[in-house]
């Protein structure tokens, strides 16, 4: 054991008294607030300066005790997130299906025909066509060749092949697909042919017909095609003149061929009342349509 | 001789930084104190005069860097440095060379351990580290006692005292690194061990504790 010299004893005693005095002064009068602020400022700056170096090491060491637990927690949370994402995807898919069915229901009510919903199970070339889709419904469900296939109010194509449980639909996007279409505003008739999934081509029957950009085309009669009339085909995107002097329009399709999911096959058996006959108006004047349900004239040509 | 105060100030600031950024957060809720270990190590290796001065200075700086009243750590660490300086003479490696210790070292050396010199060096430091750890561990309840007297204690004295025992063990582990570092700095700045004659011979690679003991 080392012995303290007298000087060391006195120094120790003096410093101890000084420390007690400091303590008393600080507790009673807060005499060291300024010095404390300065030292804490300097040390705080040093803390912040060294934290980029020491902080990662400290956090790594602090994480060691809970490393196993954290791994389990992370795995559990990842599984939970994956489950929630699946549920969200399922919900989104169900919502899209419900919306598609609602649009088909609305179109069936509007057109007065039965619409058989079916889901697309395959897409690609088939039967010599480039753009076809296969539906999960067939002749057992009442689908026949030639029936019109829609997506909401828009035409998609027609059935070209049927088996008992599936049907192949030729899409409008196919170059060998032709459909009669008319300008809904002017009534101008023409033929729409496919040019791939991005756009269609509409050639009016009258080469001198005036076509305006933005015009809406709907299905109309053309040759022997069996499309249900009045369905939306697309919107005129641009108009150009052919070398032969004719006019053709590039049409933005109402439904993109690459995004088909739930479709409807129109079965043309009418579900509404029989079509009313034209009857003479009062006083044998050319009158209007006679509505047998309400016994009133719905419209007049005058 | 101006090197020694500069080295002391640098050491105080460094250990306060390490205490605040690494040691303190990693050892919560144990009151492990690297600065107290340093003060004890200085007292052990440099004697009571250096222990008193260094303990008071480090404690006062620590007080000003904390929110408790100034003078608390200065008083407590002054006591740590003083006690370490007085008791330091009891735990020099000469006293370490007990029959039990010698037998242990001989057995390890006979087995031909590759790192036996390092292990033996740590073994030689064990009493000093234990004393430094014990003193640093006592510093926490002592400071809590002073704070209780001044009415500014955040925890009860008993709560701090109970946690001091495991903290002292960790302090002793820290002392295994701090004590030789302090010795190296003191040697480099021209100050040997207090009151025990000339400075120790430099450590030769491969030397055992027995060799070290002979040189002291």
Image: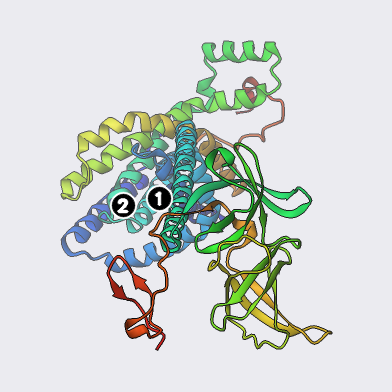
Circle 1 residue: B53
Q: How many numbered marks are there? A: 2
Verify CB contact (< 8 Å) between mark 2 and mark 1.
yes
Which residue occupies 71% across, 61% down?
Answer: A177
Of all residues, the one furthest to the right in this rendering is A243
Residue B157, percent from left and from top: 21, 38
Q: Which one is nearer the viewer's eye here, A262 or A54?
A: A262
Q: Mark 1 lies on which chain?
A: B
Work out which quarter of the rendered image holds the C terminus of chain A and state it: bottom left
Residue A98, percent from left and from top: 43, 52
Residue B53, percent from left and from top: 40, 50
Mark number for residue A15? Answer: 2
- Residue A56 vs residue B136: left or right? right
Label 1: which secondary element? helix
Q: How crowded is mark 1: few (under 14 residues within 10 Å), some or many (20 or more)?
A: many
Q: Mark 2 lies on which chain?
A: A
Q: How crowded is mark 2: few (under 14 residues within 10 Å), some or many (20 or more)?
A: many
Which residue occupies 65% across, 34% down?
Answer: B201
Asked if one can make out residue B5 in the rendered structure from this viewpoint, the answer is no
Asked if one can make out residue A299 in the rendered structure from this viewpoint, the answer is yes
Q: Which one is nearer the viewer's eye here, A20 or B159?
A: B159
How many angstroms separate mark 2 from mark 1 (CA)? 8 Å
Residue B161, percent from left and from top: 26, 33
Mark number for residue B64? Answer: none
Work out which quarter of the rendered image holds the N terminus of chain A and state it: top left
Q: Which one is nearer the viewer's eye here, B114 or A211?
A: A211
Which residue occupies 55% across, 46% down?
Answer: A119
């Amino acid at each position: 054991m080392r012995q303290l010299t007298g000087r060391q004893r006195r120094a120790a005693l003096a410093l101890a008294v000084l420390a007690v005095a400091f303590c008393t002064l600080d507790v009673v009068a807060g005499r060291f607030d300024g010095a404390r602020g300065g030292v804490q400022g300097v040390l705080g700056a040093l803390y912040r300066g060294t934290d980029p170096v020491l902080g990662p090491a400290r956090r790594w060491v602090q994480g060691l005790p809970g490393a196993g637990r954290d791994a389990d927690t992370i795995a559990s949370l990842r599984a939970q997130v994956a489950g929630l994402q699946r549920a969200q995807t399922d919900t989104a898919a169900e919502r899209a299906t419900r919306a598609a069915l609602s649009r088909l229901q609305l179109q069936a009510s509007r057109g007065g025909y039965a619409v058989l919903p079916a889901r697309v199970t395959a897409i690609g070339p088939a039967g010599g066509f480039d753009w076809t889709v296969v539906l999960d419904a067939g002749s057992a469900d009442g689908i026949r060749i030639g029936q019109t296939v829609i997506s909401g109010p828009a035409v998609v194509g027609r059935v070209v092949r049927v088996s008992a449980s599936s049907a192949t639909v030729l899409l409008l996007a196919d170059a060998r697909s032709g459909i009669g279409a008319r300008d809904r505003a002017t009534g101008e008739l023409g033929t729409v042919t496919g040019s791939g999934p991005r756009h269609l081509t509409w050639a009016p029957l009258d080469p001198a017909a005036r076509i305006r950009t933005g015009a809406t085309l709907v299905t109309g009669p053309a040759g022997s095609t069996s499309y249900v009339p009045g369905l939306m085909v697309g919107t005129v995107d641009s108009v150009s003149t052919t070398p032969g002097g004719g006019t053709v329009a590039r049409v933005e399709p109402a439904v993109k061929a690459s995004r088909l999911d739930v479709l409807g096959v129109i079965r043309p058996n009418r579900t509404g009342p029989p079509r009313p006959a034209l009857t003479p108006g009062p006083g044998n004047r050319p009158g209007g349509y006679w509505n047998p349900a309400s016994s009133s004239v719905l419209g007049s040509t005058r | 001789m101006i090197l020694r105060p500069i080295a002391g100030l640098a050491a105080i600031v460094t250990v306060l930084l390490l205490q605040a950024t690494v040691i303190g957060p990693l050892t919560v809720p144990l009151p492990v104190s690297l600065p107290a270990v340093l003060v004890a190590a200085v007292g052990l290796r440099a004697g009571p005069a250096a222990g008193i001065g260094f303990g008071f200075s480090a404690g006062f700086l620590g007080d000003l860097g904390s929110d408790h009243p100034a003078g608390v750590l200065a008083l407590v660490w002054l006591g740590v440095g003083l006690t370490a300086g007085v008791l330091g003479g009891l735990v020099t490696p000469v006293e370490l060379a007990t029959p039990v210790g010698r037998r242990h070292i001989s057995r390890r050396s006979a087995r031909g351990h590759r790192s036996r010199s390092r292990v033996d060096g740590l073994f030689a430091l064990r009493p000093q580290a234990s004393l430094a750890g014990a003193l640093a561990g006592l510093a926490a309840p002592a400071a809590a006692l002073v704070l209780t007297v001044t009415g500014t204690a955040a925890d009860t004295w008993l709560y701090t005292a109970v946690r001091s025992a495991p903290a002292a063990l960790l302090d002793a582990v820290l002392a295994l690194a701090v004590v030789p570092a302090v010795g190296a700095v003191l040697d480099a700045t021209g100050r040997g061990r207090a009151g025990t004659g000339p400075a120790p011979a430099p450590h030769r690679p491969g030397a055992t504790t027995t060799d070290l003991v002979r040189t002291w």
